[in-house]
Amino acid sequence: MAADDRGLTPKQEAFACAYVETGNASEAYRRAYDVAPDCKPNTDEKRACELLKNGKVTGRVEALQTEHAKRHNITVDALTAELEEARGKAMDTGQVSAAVSATMGKAKLHGLVKDKTVNEFTGADGQPVTPVINVSLCRPK
């Protein structure tokens, strides 16, 4: 498959576009690479992850995201103003939960809060593994 002037194959370009559109790497991989329906989920997740580790692909994703932000005039200031407006309306109507969500959105936008990463362990078959802890209780003599 011939690469474009950025060094991407047509499928890598399609992956980058689908990833920006969906925000889901596995779904983008399935769309760009015509993955068979009976493909194991772990396979497309692994391949999507490999693509996101490719500097040329991630560079293209970032370029597309920047283009979209400019085209739609999306800035941190604009998003902050929208969230503040939503928080104000929520407080005016007594919707405290919505106000808290808007406040947390502003904090995340400004890098003050990071989402917690959850690590899940999988076995050789790709299925979740349940940790088992064996405990022996002994009576003191």
Image (cartoon, helix red, strand yellow):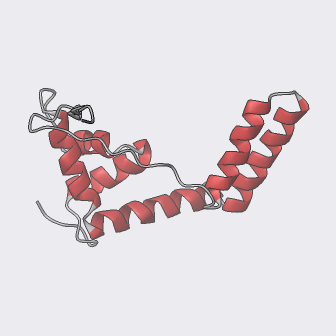
Against 128, residue 71 (above or below) is below
Which residue is depicted at the point 18% across and 44% down?
Answer: 33
Q: Position of residue 67 (x, y in %)?
A: 51, 62
Q: Is residue 89 left or right of residue 129?
A: right
**Rendered position, 135 above or below 2:** above
Q: Residue 81: where, in percent of width, then height?
A: 78, 53
**Residue 70 in the image: above or below residue 126:** below
Q: Position of residue 84 (x, y in %)?
A: 80, 48
In the picture as drawn, the residue positioned furthest to the right comes out as 92
Quadrant of image for the C terminus? top left
Residue drawn at point x = 88 percent, y = 27 percent: 93
Task: Find residue 64 and report its horizontal and vertical position in percent.
Answer: 44, 60
Q: Nearer the viewer, residue 115 or 32?
A: 115
Residue depicted at x 27% and y 36%: 140
The answer to whether residue 133 is left or right of residue 95 is: left
Nearest the camera: 62 or 70? 62
